[in-house]
Amino acid sequence: MSIVILVYAIEFTVQTAFLFAALWIMVKLQKLNYNLPGLLGAAALSCALDMIPVVGHFIAVGVLLLCIWKITESEYVDVAFTVFVGYALTFGMNLFLLSALIGDLCPSEHIAEGEPEYSELLAEYQPDTNKFGPEISQPDPDESAAIYPGTERQENKSSAAHLTQTNSPAVSTAEEVAKDIQLKGLIQNAGRPSLLVHTGIKTYTIVQGETLPVKTRKGQVMICFEGITAKQAVLKIDGRPFKLPL
């Protein structure tokens, strides 16, 4: 109860001060007769009546008109002009006070000093990629040979071709491919982020932890999106790690 009384007392004091200042300004500008105790009493009486619910404001306006007419002994036009403009000035003061109490509502465009960037937080709290995606089981070579005769010879040929392709020329090819790759954007989602990768021929969307065959100017390569560190994306191109700026 005491808090409610305190709030009403503060409101009454502030409104009385604003209305008294507005009336004093209007009387001074029009060079009307006045006295400070009378203006202060009229402002206090009007603000007290204005706090009555529903009909209080209308009663307060009528009482203030009568008080200003008695204090200034002026014509009704001058009195009405003083009262109505005084209320308008009071309303403006209330808006100024309200905006000062609320403060600046615009969001800050600068990151607070010492606050880590989003990319650093994302790199720190990366989910375990082993939890996503099914495990790939390798078939038993004896079982495959039994079901598909002649496949063992083909697998040996493909293994030899793969060993031939992973020599030193493939290393230089991965470096040349990394120079042609451009990162077009990063897509954040609830699970894993996705990366838009442009290889010079086509744009691919690669999910973190996923390995995808892509077409480049140097031929087809395998690209894996490993993660993000400090405004850089870590990619593996044919098994070699590269850091590309976002």
Image: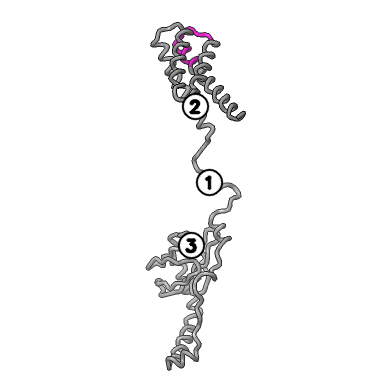
| Circle 3: residue type | Pro
Q: Is residue 182 left or right of residue 5?
A: left
Instruction: Give whichever of 14, 47 is nearer the camera.
Output: 47
* Alpha carbons under labels 1 and 3: distance apart: 24 Å
* Alpha carbons under labels 1 and 2: distance apart: 32 Å
The residue that appears at 59% across and 26% down in the rendered structure is: 5
Between label 1 and label 3, give the one nearer the viewer. Answer: 3
Q: Which mark is residue 110?
A: 1
Residue that mark 2 sits on: 94
Q: Earlier in the sequence, mark 1 or mark 2?
A: 2
Tell me whether circle 2 and circle 3 mark residues in contact (CB < 8 Å). no
Describe the element under mark 3 as helix, strand or loop: loop
Describe the element under mark 1 as helix, strand or loop: loop
Instruction: Give whichever of 217, 226 is nearer the camera.
Output: 226
| Circle 2: residue type | Asn
Q: Position of residue 228 (x, y in %)?
A: 53, 62
**Predominant SS of the magenta segment:** helix
Q: For the magenta stretch, what is the residue range?
A: 23-35
Q: Earlier in the sequence, mark 1 or mark 3?
A: 1
